[in-house]
Image (tube, rainbow, N blue to C red):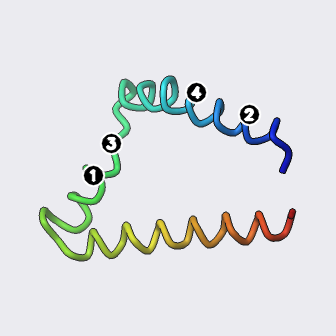
Amino acid sequence: MKKKNYVIAFIAGVAVTLFLLPLLYALGVPSFDVVLNSLFGKDSILAIVFSLVLVIIILFLLVKYVNKNG
C-alpha cells in the first residue's frame, strides 16, 4: 500500500474513535464488555475465549486481504 493510504486509514481510525463511538454510546448501544457479561456472565473463561477467537479471525482476514493486494 502507498503511504497515503496508511495515513488515510489512520485518520479514519481516529475519526471513528472520536466521533462514532461516543455517538453510539449516546444512542444507548451497549459496549462490548456489557455484551460479553450478558452473554457469558461475569468472570467467565468463555468470554475470554470468544474475544480471542474474534481477534484471531479479524487478524486472519486482515493478513489475507493484505497478501491478496500486495
Return the x and y of residue 52 as percentages of the image width and height: 39, 71
How far apart are labels 3 and 2 at the CA level? 28 Å
Q: Secondary structure at mark 1?
A: helix
Return the x and y of residue 6 as percentages of the image width and height: 74, 41
Residue 8, numbered label: 2
**Which residue is at 69% across, 39% downward?**
9
Sequence order check, earlier mark of 3 and 2: 2
Q: Residues within 10 Å of mark 4 (few under 14, many from 20)?
A: few
Q: Does the CB distance between marks 4 and 1 fall below 8 Å?
A: no
Q: Closer to us: mark 2 or mark 1?
A: 2
Question: Which amino acid lies under the numbered mark 2 shown in the image of this protein?
Answer: Ile
Question: Which amino acid lies under the numbered mark 3 shown in the image of this protein?
Answer: Pro
Q: Residues within 10 Å of mark 2 (few under 14, many from 20)?
A: few
Return the x and y of residue 37 as percentages of the image width and height: 21, 58
Closer to the camera, 24 or 66? 66
Which residue is under mark 3? 30
Residue 33, numbered label: 1
Which residue is under mark 4? 15
How far apart are labels 2 and 1 at the CA level? 29 Å
Sequence order check, earlier mark of 2 and 1: 2
Return the x and y of residue 7 as percentages of the image width and height: 72, 34
Q: Closer to us: mark 4 or mark 3?
A: 4
**Which residue is at 47% across, 66% downward?**
55
Question: Which amino acid lies under the numbered mark 1 shown in the image of this protein?
Answer: Asp
Location of residue 51 with respect to 19 vertically, above or below: below
How far apart are labels 4 and 1 at the CA level? 22 Å
How far apart are labels 1 and 3 at the CA level? 8 Å
Q: Is residue 24 left or right of residue 16?
A: left
Q: Does the CB distance between marks 1 and 3 fall below 8 Å?
A: no
